[in-house]
Image (cartoon, grey):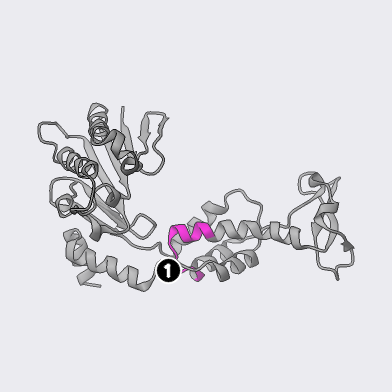
């Protein structure tokens, strides 16, 4: 049986097939109660079910730079984490530790010493992956093809009129957007048809896409020959048809949803990678 143990934001255990996911980047919030025991149990679980992967999202919250102002509970949990990462007295063969962070420069120096895991630094939204942490890998913002695919995945089965060319155009217009930014753009665009319904003053009858023998009301311009003046509140919900998602809806959303990653952010990540990243990446950055 393989095991996947992740530390992130919810604190609940999810079982799916042969994989077990323990989400617990709530560790700092439970520090006074659980302290270091949860970290120890987490590694023990991985060793018992190896081959296993321990994935730690926002690892900086667990292994940030130690200082005099932090609580004793915080110190203990960081110390236990470092001890478990060292694997002294344990057979950690078959256990891989991955961490992800957007701010790798805030990690404690001890966590970056070479032992045997991987830290990912990415601008997909968890920019870096680190074993206490042997490799530090910078994952940059998604390229055009990745952005195109992200738009398709987020739109999913939602009825729309977007063509493959439309998806490519959206990818070209979102240079500098992270994966999270693109998901926000799509969520906002998905609301555009709803906004059209709520703001419409005129509707017209059109054939139902699921039952051609029935007609439904959909928003239209006042100048449409079939337009009838009414509000969406005058129409039964089962007779209301939202307009299909169009490229214009996404373009409108792009006007209000701007990228959250700045050129300065990228420069800082690249500089950190140049100074502290994996050797292969230092060579890559030196030659580009």
Answer whether residue 182 is magenta in the image: yes
Do we see residue 1 in this rendering? yes
Q: Considering only vertical position in the picture, is 109 above or below 71?
A: below
Percent across and percent down for residue 252 are 61, 68
Quadrant of res 177: bottom left
Q: Is residue 233 left or right of residue 66?
A: right
In the picture as drawn, the residue positioned furthest to the left comes out as: 89
- Crowding at mark 1 (Cα within 10 Å: few <14, some 14-19, many 20+): many
- Left or right, 271 with respect to 249, comes to left
Q: Quadrant of the C terminus?
A: bottom left
Q: Name the residue that disc number 1 marks.
A: 176
Task: Tell me how many marks there are.
Answer: 1
The vertical placement of 210 against 5, above or below, is: below
Residue range in magenta is: 173-184
Q: Name which residue lies at 22% across and 53% down.
A: 69
Residue found 17% across the figure and 34% down from its top: 92
Residue 195 location, x and y as percent?
Answer: 70, 60
Which quarter of the picture shows residue 204? bottom right
169 left or right of 133 in image: right
Is 239 included in the stretch rendered in magenta?
no
Q: Quadrant of residue 231?
A: bottom right
State left or right for residue 8 relative to residue 174.
left
């Amino acid at each position: 049986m393989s095991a996947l143990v992740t530390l992130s934001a919810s604190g609940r255990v999810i079982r799916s097939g042969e994989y077990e996911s323990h989400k617990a980047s709530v560790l700092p919030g439970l520090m006074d109660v659980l302290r270091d025991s949860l970290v120890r149990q987490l590694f023990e679980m991985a060793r018992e079910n190896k081959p296993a992967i321990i994935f730690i999202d926002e690892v900086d919250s667990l292994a940030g730079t130690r200082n005099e102002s932090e609580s004793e509970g915080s110190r203990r949990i960081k110390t236990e984490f470092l001890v478990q990462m060292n694997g002294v007295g344990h057979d950690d063969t078959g256990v891989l530790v991955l961490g992800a962070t957007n701010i790798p420069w805030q990690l404690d120096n001890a966590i970056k010493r070479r032992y045997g895991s991987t830290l990912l630094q990415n601008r997909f939204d968890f920019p870096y992956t680190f074993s206490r942490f042997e490799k530090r890998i910078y994952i940059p913002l998604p390229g055009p093809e990745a952005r195109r695919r992200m738009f398709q995945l987020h739109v999913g089965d939602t009825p729309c009129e977007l063509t493959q060319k439309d998806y490519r155009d959206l990818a070209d217009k979102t240079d500098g957007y992270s994966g999270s930014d693109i998901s926000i753009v799509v969520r906002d665009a998905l609301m555009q048809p709803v906004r059209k319904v709520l703001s419409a003053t005129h509707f017209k009858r059109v054939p139902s896409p699921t039952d051609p023998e029935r007609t439904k009301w959909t928003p239209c311009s006042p100048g449409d020959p079939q337009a009838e003046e009414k509000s969406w509140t005058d129409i039964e919900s089962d007779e209301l048809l939202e307009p299909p998602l169009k490229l214009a809806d996404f373009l409108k959303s792009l006007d209000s949803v701007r990228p959250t990653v700045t050129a300065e952010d990228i420069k800082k990540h690249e500089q950190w990678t140049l100074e502290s990243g994996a050797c292969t990446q230092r060579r890559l950055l030196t030659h580009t």
